[in-house]
Amino acid sequence: MELFGVPLETIYLYGLIISGVLTFLFILFNDIFSGLELPDQFNPTLIFSFLTVFFASGFLFKSVTGLNSGVIAAISLLISLSTVTLLNVFVLIPISSAEESLAFHDNDLRGRVGRVLTSIPVDGFGEVLIESISGSIAKTAASFKNEGIASDTKVLIIEVKNGVVYVMPHQN
């Protein structure tokens, strides 16, 4: 069967090449598109994956089997939908959730206990190490009550302003 005078096998092949190149370019320049807040249905990764799998399966079925063109298109559509659904559910959604869970905000540090790395002088700054399950964070620190705190002292973080944690000695 032909479409616009071009065999369907050629259309599938051209579609596969174009969607594969677009997918590769999207992977390279993903940071440019990350600022666009599109709904999940318009995720370019899913769209390009759908097109690539659709054209690849259409090309393979058309060149290997002797099935009707409509049946091939329907089978390719089902394969693409199921593949993209599995990709979204088992890969993209867990990755996006994991990425958000590793980040922290300065306000999340309030109430945590840390250890002074560099002593904090009166009216000055030092450094505090805050340890957690996912790793350690070193932050610039100042005394909340404007008193000197020696290094290796356990401290309680009272507040965070402009990236500086204000601490006071922690009593067990």
Image (cartoon, rainbow, N blue to C red):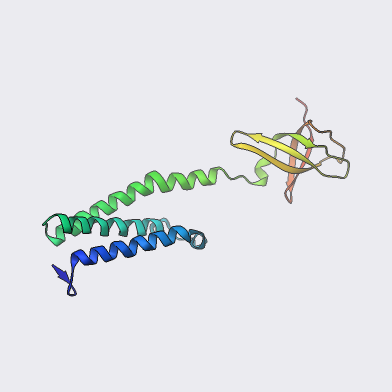
Q: Quadrant of residue 114?
A: top right
Picture quarter with the C terminus: top right
Where in the figure is residue 85, as x and y percent of width and height?
A: 33, 49
In this rendering, the answer to whether 142 lies above or below 28 is above
Asked whether, in this view, residue 6 is left or right of residue 53, the answer is left
Q: Position of residue 118 (x, y in %)?
A: 80, 38
Residue reaching furthest top? 172
Which quarter of the figure has residue 120? top right
Position of the N terminus, as image quadrant, is: bottom left
Q: Residue at x 81, y 33 (%)?
A: 151
Report x, y in % for residue 49: 34, 56
Residue 38 lies, in percent from the top left, at 45, 61
Left or right? Give the position of 134 relative to 45.
Answer: right
> Which of 65/143 is in front?
65
Figure label count = 0
State which quadrant residue 7 falls in.
bottom left
Q: Residue at x 19, y 74 (%)?
A: 4
Q: Which residue is drawn at the image coordinates 53% and 46% (left, top)? A: 100
In-front residue for pair 6/83: 6
Q: Residue at x 37, y 46 (%)?
A: 89
